[in-house]
Image: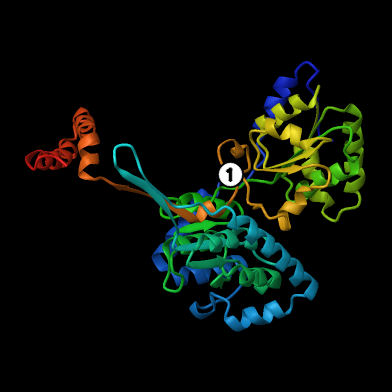
Amino acid sequence: MPLMLSTAEDGFEAAFTALLAMKREDAPDVDAAVAAIIAEVRARGDAALIELTAKFDRLDLSPETLAFSAGEIEAECARVSPADRAALELAAGRIRAYHERQMPQDARWTDAAGAELGWRWGPVAAAGLYVPGGLASYPSSVLMNAIPAKVAGVERLVISCPTPGGAVNPLVLLAARLAGVDTVYRVGGAQAIAALAYGTATIRPVDKITGPGNAYVAAAKRRVFGRVGIDMIAGPSEILVIADATADPDWVALDLLSQAEHDESAQAILVTDDVAMACKVTAAVEARLRTIERRAIAGASWRDFGAVIVTRDLVEAAALSNRVAPEHLELCVADPEALLPRIAHAGAVFLGHWTPEAIGDYVGGPNHVLPTARSARFSSGLSVMDFLKRTTIARMTPAALAAIGPAAERLAASEGLQAHGASVRARLDRLNREGGA
């Protein structure tokens, strides 16, 4: 059974605080192993990459076969059924259209002092996308990572996707083609992250690495950050559903299980102002657990990390949700628009009874790479902005420098930076000798 709480009961605050502090990842300490792998790849390049792929993925490669050939990609894409291809194309089109609207605009203006200021946006030159491999790999993750990069204008876009035992998901390769990926490498793990960050004789280094992975991949991304940019360190999936008496309890149960089935460490939370709804959803979850294929995983998640919280009203429900700052938030209430302004922290919000979180995983349009572990309090999901850099622009006229330069000179002196002040003073002195601007 999940944790059952009510805000009207004594001890709620302590129990809810414990829920927020709950550790949902019990990964071993992999940092030392990852550090050794990265060092090997940096020192021996392709040779280390090939040895590690043979060891961990049971696949023998050579420098020539680290990447899929055009012919191999063509053959795998041909295996995709027309119905699956159509669904993937629909998803790609919707994701692309949504992210095109995120593109920011350059700006230039002249301020009151006569200084010309502004900024311009430009893409990173190269990005590497990590995709978990094997037959369980997710083509939706390819689209969600690669399409924003292409919309941003990234010139070189590569994927690293392990193929353990040679197992290939043709949908992943088709998604890569639809998204405009240049090269797909069949390597994975911490060694793939090292290769993308530092390069080898065959794999050119990139500037940004995005995409989900296991504990080793996450540890490797932490270690290479600074050498390259990364998107985020993602934890187990999360969903919080706020439901009132108008919700369908079976639909809510399915939405909770849609995240619980990801991982035994995933978390599904129901917050409702209706005691009867809490009971109905709990019963519906138990019934549905007997029917889904991943019942063992979902059941463990629901048992160990699930929660059902009864509140006095929906205002209180929104306040609790903000403290959780969930990755996914569903507002399964009669008037979700009225509740939405009260939501301050969530990776993504799904409004109303007809908007299941699962639609956002595939074809909704917004990105499904979202902040977890309460990091929605200070971060956002993946977007075009993750693949762009903002460069600021400034131009001083003689008059503008005369107006604001003395203040810069004074501040430089206050900080003890003589050359800073002198670089401004030299120009001001010339202006004074030549009679002003």
Q: In percent of the image, x 69 and y 46: which residue is there? A: 237
- Residue 81, horizontal then vertical, whole percent: 78, 75
Badge 1: residue crowd in 10 Å (few <14, some 14–19, many ≥20): many
Compared to 226, does 336 lie above or below?
above
Q: Of 250 and 48, which appears nearest the observer? A: 250
| Residue 108 placement, left or right of 179 | left
Q: Of 356 and 227, which appears nearest the observer? A: 356
Compared to 342, does 86 lie above or below?
below
* Amino acid type shown at disc 1: Ser
Q: Is residue 260 visible?
A: yes
Q: Is residue 136 visible?
A: no
Residue beneath disc 1:
380
Seen as rendered, the residue at the extreme bottom is 71
| Residue 84 occupies quadrant | bottom right
Image quarter in which the N terminus is found: top right
Task: Tell me the colour scheme of the image.
Answer: rainbow
Image quarter in which the C terminus is found: top left
Circle 1: element type:
loop
- Residue 306, horizontal then vertical, whole percent: 78, 37
Q: Of 427 and 173, which appears nearest the observer? A: 427
| Residue 260 placement, left or right of 366 | right
Seen as rendered, the residue at the extreme top is 10
Compared to 27, does 81 lie above or below?
below
Q: In percent of the image, x 65 and y 72: which residue is there? A: 173
| Residue 11 occupies quadrant | top right
